[in-house]
Image (cartoon, grey):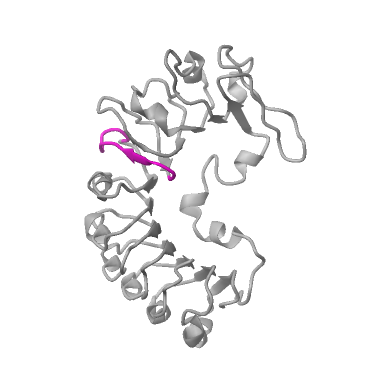
Amino acid sequence: MVVGTSAPSLLPFARVHRLITDYPGAPGVRRSKTLWHLSAEVSRIGGEGGGAQRRLEWGRPPAKPERIEALQISARPAPGVQLPGWLRELPALKYLSLPLSWMRATTGDEIPPSAQVLELAGAGTVTVPKQAKFPHVGFLMAYSGVLKFGPDSFPGIERLGLKLDPAQAMLDTVSALSGLRALHLGSVHAASVFSRVGSLRLEYLGLSYGRLPNIEDIGLLSHLTSLQLKSLSCLESMEGVAGLPALEELSIGYCTRLRDVSDVANIPRLRRLATLGMRDVGISAILPTLKTKGLEMHSLAGVI
């Protein structure tokens, strides 16, 4: 059993939520020698410790395309500028990051079929054309801007990180993605989120940066094994989590109005608990019960 205050690092959270952190291009990979970089001009990026430079030229195919497994494109669309044709010919590319704005006019054919992870960066709201299909993408991330698409755009998706639109309308699309195992939603404001995605057999759920008032109906997601709650400014109670029979891993971060966490002590299969950015929100009162369960516990604020 690990009980105490961990070092000031997000590592415990990464260990807890493997479904959302264990993928090609996960945090850390971008700082490694495996990431290549492409802009509209000749560009370069260094590896850790001043390692070899990784650079690609827009108008020139790479000499050894089979070496490129992770690629970040920073150039935004401009009149007369298209993604380079050689991009689709990269046989080993697994992780691709590009500005969200490229998705406005995409056909899907620009992305190599080997790409399994697609990360989209940038602000604004972008709608993927209905005819665009990405059957090979299993993990899609769009956290900084709002991406709208239909369920047929990503038929093979298993993991999704998405910033919701203000009307929360994308929850209808999310609920139709029957193959989803892991879902992380940003800007969550309505407690109806649980009933709207309740038909999915999710194993991981993350909710962050929103005015979600409560999680009382979270028990509808009875297959959850891992749950992350972060920066939910209106959340005051953990009522509902005891109704998750399969939940093993839980992290709570920056939910500063949280006061009642008593239900955490009644989660039947909980094995790991991590807290971040909060003082005592009531965990000390249930700590004796948690210790008797032999939990692995981490705190980045001295709560546990």
Q: Is residue 255 above or below residue 112?
A: below
- Between 189 and 136, the one lying in front of the other is 189
- Between 183 and 92, the one lying in front of the other is 183
Q: Report if residue 284 lies within the magenta region.
A: no
Q: Residue furthest right?
A: 50
Q: Residue at x 52, y 25 (%)?
A: 75
The secondary structure that dominates the magenta segment is loop
Q: Position of residue 100 (x, y in %)?
A: 42, 33
Q: Position of residue 66 (x, y in %)?
A: 59, 22
In the picture, which quadrant includes the N terminus? bottom right
Residue 202 shown left or right of residue 73 in the figure: left
Q: Quadrant of residue 158?
A: top left
Q: Position of residue 173 (x, y in %)?
A: 25, 44
Q: Residue at x 74, y 29 (%)?
A: 52
Residue 85 shown left or right of residue 68 in the figure: left
Q: Report if residue 147 lies within the magenta region.
A: yes
In the picture, which quadrant includes the C terminus? bottom right
Magenta span: 143-154
Q: Residue at x 66, y 39 (%)?
A: 32
